[in-house]
Amino acid sequence: MTDFSFSRRISRRISRRIIGSIACSLALGLIAPLAPAQTRAAGAPNMADYIIVVINQELVTNGELQTRLARIREDAARNKQ
């Protein structure tokens, strides 16, 4: 009789783990489509904001430089008209 109750406990533990695994898989399967896709254009460069130079203890980052360059290009294009 002891043998039978031991096997019953083992089968209950296994079935609980299987049910838990299935429930977890279903939950992840339902949540995954809700996550936004992280896509990037094929030819677009990967722009990172990093420090380019330090002038008088002031940091100049890549993002600031790109913004200033875009503004300068727009001004030059307007003045050529």
Image (cartoon, rainbow, N blue to C red):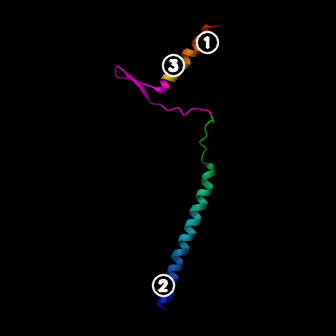
Which image quarter: residue 15?
bottom right
Please say whether residue 27 is one of the residues in the magenta stretch: no
Q: Earlier in the sequence, mark 2 or mark 1?
A: 2
Q: Viewed as shown, does residue 61 lie left or right of 45?
A: left
Report which residue position mark 1 lands on: 77
Q: Residue 26's spot in the image, x, y percent?
A: 61, 61
How many numbered marks are there?
3
Q: Earlier in the sequence, mark 1 or mark 3?
A: 3
Which image quarter: residue 45?
top right
Where does the magenta region start and end?
A: 43-64
The correct choice, above or below, for 36 with respect to 4 in the image is above
Q: Residue 56's spot in the image, x, y percent?
A: 34, 19
Q: Amino acid at mark 3?
A: Arg
Q: Are marks 2 and 3 in contact (CB under 8 Å)?
A: no
The correct choice, above or below, for 37 with respect to 47 in the image is below
Q: Residue 25's spot in the image, x, y percent?
A: 59, 61
Q: Residues within 10 Å of mark 3 (few under 14, many from 20)?
A: few
Name the residue rendered at 53%, 75% in the picture: 14
Report which residue position mark 3 lands on: 68
Q: Amino acid at mark 2?
A: Phe
Residue sitting at the far front: 43
| Mark 1–mark 3 distance (CA, rounded to whole Å) | 14 Å
Q: Is residue 20 or residue 59 the one in the foreground?
A: 59
